[in-house]
Amino acid sequence: MQRAALLDAARSLLSEGGTEALTFPALAERTGLARSSVYEYFRSRAAVVEELCAVDFPVWAAEVEAAMAAADGPEAKVEAYVRRQLALVGDRRHRAVVAISASELDAGAREKIRAAHGGLVAMIVEALDAMGHQEPRLAAMLLQGVVDAAVRRIELGAAEDPTTITDAAVAMALRGVWG
């Protein structure tokens, strides 16, 4: 229970103040634990971040996968892939992981995050192949780049409404720059 409370506190801190806010004293204060107790659960900030990704990323991936499974046809699956990821931007679990993307992580943690991200991209390859893409894996990686750019735009509080950004990302995914 204390480990879960520490992870929840870490999500809140990252969501509210980015990586600078994630400190062991702040985790201790949020959970009511002694600072030394936090070290019993995590050896470093990178370890907290790694565990957050290990716990939260599968939840997001399952949500994206469920949205795609409910969609009928490859174009609808691509749209669901984009829309569900962008809908998750407001989720504080998502905001926490985005906040840590610039964090100092060891090579092992970075590789785990890369692998999880690769699993998300792999979800869309079949739909892109069914749409006739010659290079569906490459198209999937580029599509994720569009999603990532839209995520950053939404998180920056861009002038455009998040719905407008999402609609533009879907149009880009389905029709390219002519959308």
Image (cartoon, grey):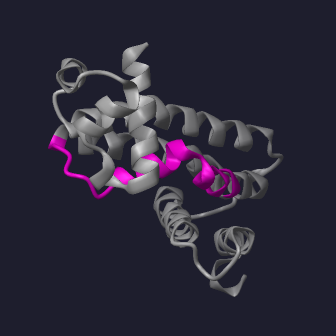
Visible in this render: residue 117?
no
Q: Residue at x 57, y 73 (%)?
A: 157
From the viewer's side, name the closer residue of 112 and 98.
98
Q: Is residue 152 left or right of residue 84?
A: left
**x and y percent of residue 169 in the render?**
65, 71
Quarter residue 2 falls in: top left
Quarter the N terminus occupies = top left
Q: What's the magenta bit mostly, secondary-structure-wise?
A: helix
Q: Is residue 24 left or right of residue 27?
A: left
**x and y percent of residue 22 in the render?**
30, 45
From the viewer's side, name the closer residue of 76 and 134.
76
**x and y percent of residue 133 in the render?**
60, 64
From the viewer's side, name the closer residue of 127 and 156.
156
Quarter the C terminus occupies = bottom right
87 is higher (above) or lower (below) than 66: below
Q: Which residues are magenta?
A: 83-107
Q: Is residue 85 magenta?
A: yes
Quarter residue 5 falls in: top left
Q: Is residue 65 magenta?
A: no
Q: Residue at x 67, y 80 (%)?
A: 160
